[in-house]
Amino acid sequence: MEEKNFFDKVYEVAKLIPYGRVTSYGAIAKYLGAARSARMVGWAMNNSAAKDVPAHRVVNRIGVLTGKHHFDGTGLMQQLLENEGVKIKDNQIVDFKKHFWDPWKELG
């Protein structure tokens, strides 16, 4: 059996983020036991297009859409989140704590 690499583990967690919720790069890294690897999670999200991963649901630790420039078209990340009922103002999630999904708490 082949061992999964870090990016594959990131994708597995990201696929579990519920509709209308978001998490952070750091929260995924912490859940995977690599708390200092938030940037690696970001790199994984940058390479996730072909993996059917809801990368638009992963933002920075204060709810800013830092990965938006990796989406085709202007404002696509924001559009996808708004379609799920997440309000955005000035590239930041409004009421971030309400929408935040913590894999550490949700997945145990």
Image: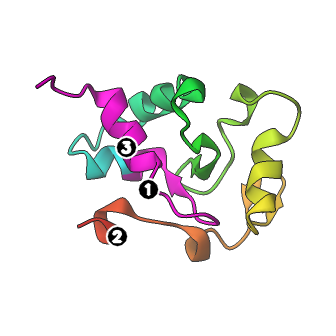
Q: Start and end of the magenta stretch?
A: 1-27
Which residue is tagged 1?
A: 16
Check if mark 1's residue and mark 3's residue have beta carbons within 8 Å. Answer: yes
Q: Position of residue 64 (x, y in %)?
A: 67, 50
Q: Position of residue 54 (x, y in %)?
A: 58, 45
Task: Tell me the element at label 1.
Answer: loop
Q: Nearer the viewer, residue 64 or 32?
A: 32
Q: Is residue 97 magenta?
A: no
| Image quarter of the C terminus | bottom left
Q: Residue furthest bottom?
A: 98
Image point 61% across, 63% down: which residue?
A: 19
Above or below for 36 versus 72? below
Q: Position of residue 92 (x, y in %)?
A: 73, 56
Is 36 positioned to the left or the right of 79 in the image?
A: left
Check if mark 2's residue and mark 1's residue have beta carbons within 8 Å. Answer: yes
Q: Residue furthest front?
A: 1
* N-term-proximal mark, 2 vs 1: 1
Above or below for 94 versus 81? below
Which residue is tagged 3?
A: 12
Task: Tell me the element at label 2.
Answer: helix
- Crowd band around label 2 with a 10 angstrom C-alpha radius: few (<14), some (14–19), many (20+): few
Q: Residue furthest right?
A: 74
Which residue is tagged 2?
A: 106
Task: Tell me the element at label 3.
Answer: helix
- Cα separation, mark 1 vs mark 3, equals 7 Å
Q: Amino acid at mark 2?
A: Glu
* N-term-proximal mark, 3 vs 2: 3
